Structure formats: structure tokens, C-alpha cells
Image: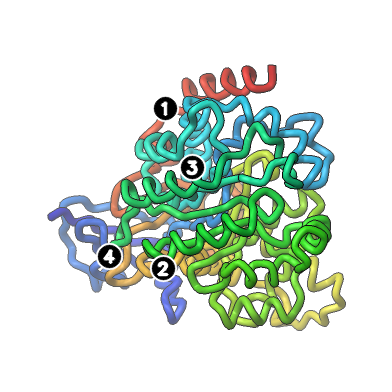
Amino acid sequence: MSTLLIKHALLLVTMDDHRREIPDGGLFIRDGFIEKVGATNSLPDKADEVLDVSGHVILPGLINTHHHFYQTLTRTVPAAQDANLFNWLTTLYPIWAKLTPEDIRISTQTALAELALSGCTTASDHLYLFPNGSRLDDEIEAAQSIGLRLHASRGSMSLGESKGGLPPDSVVDSEDNILADSERLIKKYHRAEPGSMIQIVLAPCSPFSVTGELMKESAILARKYGVHLHTHLAETQVEEEFCLQKFGYRPVPYMQSVDWVGNDVWYAHSVHVSQHEIELYAKEGCGVAHCPSSNMRLASGIAPLQQYLKAGVKVGLGVDGSASNDGSNMLAEVRQAMLLARLKAGLEGASLSSTGEEILTARQALEVGTRGGAAVLGRKDIGSLETGKCADFIGYKMDHLEYAGAQHDPLGALVFCQTRPVDMSYVHGKAVVKEGVLTGLELQPHIEKHNKAARRLLG
């Protein structure tokens, strides 16, 4: 039994049901779970480890609901810099076909290191191609040294160009192999108990890269074992046209036709949806991974974030792949979500009141990045700092240059001001970042190894 006491936070942001923000707050943690939350003088005064976090804002760890770790190896590829989604993909597929198991391991650690330094404590990744003997196991094993919680999605592509799909045949797999490997991974790695560090997700890539039969069979398999389902959906108008031509449905009705609606399903992007489809998401419990930076980068459009929230749809944030965002910064994504929602409101002629009731606030954006992400992933043990939940928390010192002049609202400053690396991050009560430095990876030699791998892919 080990205990940890966090005391004297400048502000402890709980994100609990009452959204309490506690000056001079703290946490008492036992074996990775929060036992007490409150003002410092209300907590035990002794523990195995005591951290005085004076001057820090402490808040729940951010939760990333959509990523492609391997894409850290193909950032800013010149031929893909100014392309829309389909052209971007067709440019990069041949490069990704060269990936090796070692590339998967290297890119996983790069992405998770970036995420950790940006305040992320739980990350969902979508790995959907497995060339040259690569396996999801490579990612799972590499992730352990960084220390973040991982929702590892066993992605798949089975609909190659020869069958009317978008990806080249060289990067697709047979559906029998996909389903067999999916079941193997669930049995080997998936843990559903509170505090679990690894969960498996089944994630056929997109309507334009898998068959309807694989979607149906994946849903049956996932529900047999109680794991979640994830896919890209309604990202672009071109995708909508593809679905209408190929399947006779818009993307969301197509999901209904293959049994892909329910509270165990979440979709990446969902930019191009109708009000009726938003209401369907809310009614059926479907979640959305909102990826504002990627949507802007690929000119895909602006997702209706505030309409989702108003309707009661579960929404989390995703940095998306590091070749369509070119970074893995979760706090920056919180800021981007707030700003893009405000832009959309302005473009739609919203009459902004002095209280900001019709625009997304900094606190609402942070809620999407914490509580919202936990809901999307189906986790009841993370997303807020409450008794019984996991001790996943991050801390920012407020004496940095970026926050000068913003002391009147320290929490608002984290979102409105320019982002900087987190000063501390703990996952299940264990340090992942201390004084701004990763505990599980020496960065400089890793960066050199990463760059060498990237040069080989692009050579």
C-alpha cells in the first residue's frame, strides 16, 4: 500500500459533477486511486510521498480520443502538405507501406512523449495498416515505458483499389486475418477493470477502406467481448459522395445498416452531419472524437461541436495523426477547439452576449478534453479528480512567461494563452513528467533514432 499527498495547489480543478475549483487544494491518493479531494487543511498531513505544488494549477489529465502514432514519421511530407483528405491519403499510402515493426515502436514512443508533455494521460491510437510483419503488439509493448493509459485500436483495411476502395492493395489484409488477430489481441491484452492501463478497440478504418461485411463482423466480435468500436466517419463531403455511390447511404445511415450505432461506438471527425444525425448520436449514445486541427489542416470543414454538446452527444478531443496535424499537443487541441467553435458561431451569425452564453468557454473546452474524452472511451474511472477515480492529474506552474498578466484566472490562462509543456504529470499516482522532463524516455537519442527512421521511409 503506497500513499501520495498533493497539497497547496494554487487551484485544484476537479471537473467533478459540481465543477469545483478549490484554492489551496489537494489530493490524497492510495495505490493509484484518489481517496480524498479538498482544501489542503482537510487532507491527511502525512503520506509515503508528499508533493507541495504551490503555484501550480492541478487538473485532470487530458484524454486523447483519436490518433495515428505511426504518422509522426511522415510529418510535413511536401507532396501532402496542400492536399485534401483523399489526395493526402493516396500520396502517403505508398510511404506507409514501408513501415516496419521497429518504425511502429519508435513512432509510438514519439507520439506518446509528445502527448505526455502536452498534458495527456490517456491516449487512444488507431493503427490500421500492418506492413512487413508489423503488429499492434509492437505499439503496446513500446508504450509501456512512457506510462500513459492506452486504448489501442486494432484497425484494418480490407477494401483495396481493385475492389473499389481507396487504399492500394499492398496495404490491405484479408478479413479472416483481421478478425482472427482482433480476437487474439482482445484475449491477450484487454483489461476492463477500473484503473486498467490497456484496452483494445476494434476499428475498421473507414467506409472507403473496408467492406460492410467486415464492419458487421467486427461489431459482432466487439460485443461478444465487451470492447468498443471506432472508425472514421463523415470527415469530408467527398466521403459522403463515396458512400452514396458505393452503398446507397450517407455515412451515418450506412453505420446504422451495419449495426454500428450504440454507446460502445465512437466516430472520428463527424464533420458533415445533419441535425437528425446529431440527434441520432445522442439517442443511441454514439461518441465523437473532435479533431479541429486536422479538420482545418485538410480543409475538411468545421464539426458542429456546440450543436453536439447542446444535443447531449458525448464528445472528446483528438489530435489525429501527426501527418494531418503534424503535432500531438492535447492542450493546444483544447485551445483550438474553443477558437474554432467560436469562429463557427460567428460565421453562423450568433449574437454573442456579454456573458458568452452562445460561444464555447475555456472551461467547456477543457471539459470536452477531460470528462468528454472519458465518456467517449467508456471510462468511468478517469476524466475528473474525485474520490474513487484514478489519480491521473497534471500541473502547470503559473510563473511562466506565457501566463504573465493572466493571474486573475489561472485556469482560463491555460486555454487562452499560448500553450507550453506541462510541468508535472501523474498517471495512476506515478510520475510521467517531473519538472517538465519525461521520466520514461531520454528524448535526444530517441529523436535522432526517430529522424533516421523517417529519412529511410522518405528516401
Label 1 neighbourhood size at 10 Å, few (<14), some (14-19), many (20+)?
few
In the displayed structure image, the side of residue 244 where residue 36 appears, left or right: left
Tell me how far mark 1 sits from mark 4, CA to CA: 29 Å
Residue 177's mark? 3
Task: Tell whether label 3 touches label 2 (CB within 8 Å).
Answer: no
In the displayed structure image, the side of residue 157 where residue 36 appears, left or right: left
Residue closer to the observer: 381 or 25: 381
Tell me how far mark 4 sits from mark 3, CA to CA: 42 Å
Q: Indicate the secondary structure of the residue bearing disc 1.
A: loop
Q: Earlier in the sequence, mark 2 or mark 1?
A: 2
At 40% from the left edge and 42% from the top edge, which residue is drawn? Answer: 433
Q: Indicate the secondary structure of the residue bearing disc 3.
A: helix
Residue 395 point in image, percent of width and height:
43, 54
In the displayed structure image, the side of residue 110 where residue 184 appears, left or right: left
For badge 3, the amino acid type reads: Asn
For badge 4, the amino acid type reads: Ile
At 79% from the left edge and 45% from the top edge, which residue is drawn? Answer: 86
At 18% from the left edge and 56% from the top edge, which residue is drawn? Answer: 3
The residue identified by callout 2 is 384
Q: Is residue 63 visible?
A: yes
The residue identified by callout 1 is 442
Tell me how far mark 2 sits from mark 3, CA to CA: 39 Å
Tell me the mark number nearer the camera, choosing from 1 and 3: 3
Q: Is residue 12 visible?
A: no
Residue 206 point in image, percent of width and height:
65, 53
Tell me the mark number nearer the camera, choosing from 2 and 3: 3
